[in-house]
Amino acid sequence: FVPTPYQEEELQFGKTLEKGLKEFDRVMADCKARGDKLFPGGDPGAFLLYTTYGFPVDLTNLMAEEQGLQVDQEAFAKKWKEHQEVSKSDKFKFGADLMLQADQIAELKDRRALPVTDDAPKYEWISMGAGPAIKGEVVAIWDGKAFVTSVETNKPVAVVLDRTNFYAESGGQVFDTGVLSIAAENAAENVCEFEVTDCQKYGGFAVHIGTVKFGAISVGAKVEALPDYQRRAMIAKH
């Protein structure tokens, strides 16, 4: 039995959901051990669950209420505001430096003969603020001066994938933010997480701009791409 791409994405979504539930249980256990009355709204807590695992804060609150707690909404709102400010700041701070110019596009398309990014999966999501993670492969990493094979520092870079479910900025379309992660073999934990704070498209290539939170990301790596669906849904309403 060979799963279809859609079935593979469903499996990945199930794995992401499982990881999120484990994180929720871990944080809840810590809350009970401390005798807390509120479930944390930050990281760790509701903010991490929704930015990394796609859990809407309302869902996290319902889960917490089932165990006698409520999400600290004030802390969540504060963390969300900080997240927006950092994303905006990062875009102006290094977004322009990581643009792909004609020479870089020619390097990818002509000299490396890479196909443009398949971004059709970006349409597969639920407008309420949820959707699947998908598998993709890192085909190039641009650091603003040269294409590199790997990066493991907090230095901002642009990661190009063969396929993505992230919306790139285009006309009136606001770019997605989210996470690219690399899972350890036969383990629930990730060995690398790359925080995407901007997504642009140059010459048909989707460029995920951000920084490595931990681990290292390399060309050829198989990643799990998870946009911030709740942020997308909030933007779509306006």
Image: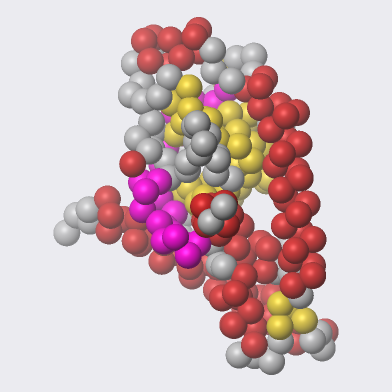
Whole-percent x and y of residue 47? 68, 63
Please tell me whether residue 22 belongs to the stretch shown in magenta: no
Q: Quadrant of residue 28?
A: bottom right
Would residue 36 be found to the left or right of residue 167 on screen?
right
The vertical placement of 35 against 174, above or below, is: below
Q: Which residue occupies the extreme front position in the image?
A: 238
- Snapshot colouring: secondary structure
Give left or right: position of 106 versus 50: left
Q: Position of residue 174 (x, y in %)?
A: 55, 40
Instruction: Note whether residue 12 is visible.
Output: yes
Q: Is residue 216 above or below residue 112?
A: below
Left or right of 228? Residue 107 is: left
Extreme residue toward the left, this view: 1
Residue at point 38%, 38% (across, down): 119
Residue 193, image x, y percentages? 60, 47
Q: Quadrant of the N terminus?
A: bottom left
Residue shown at 60%/37% (left/top)? 198
Q: Which residue corresponds to the image point at 54% horizontal and 18% vertical from the top-left?
A: 100
Name the spot of residue 152 as percent of width and height, x first.
66, 35
Answer whether residue 131 is magenta in the image: yes
Looking at the rendering, the stretch of residues picked out in magenta corresponds to: 121-143
- Name the one closer to the observer, 78 or 52: 78
Residue at the image point whose x is 42% and y is 37% from the top: 137
- Which quadrant of the figure has residue 34? bottom right
Q: Is residue 181 above or below residue 100?
A: below
Judge left or right: residue 154 versus residue 140.
right
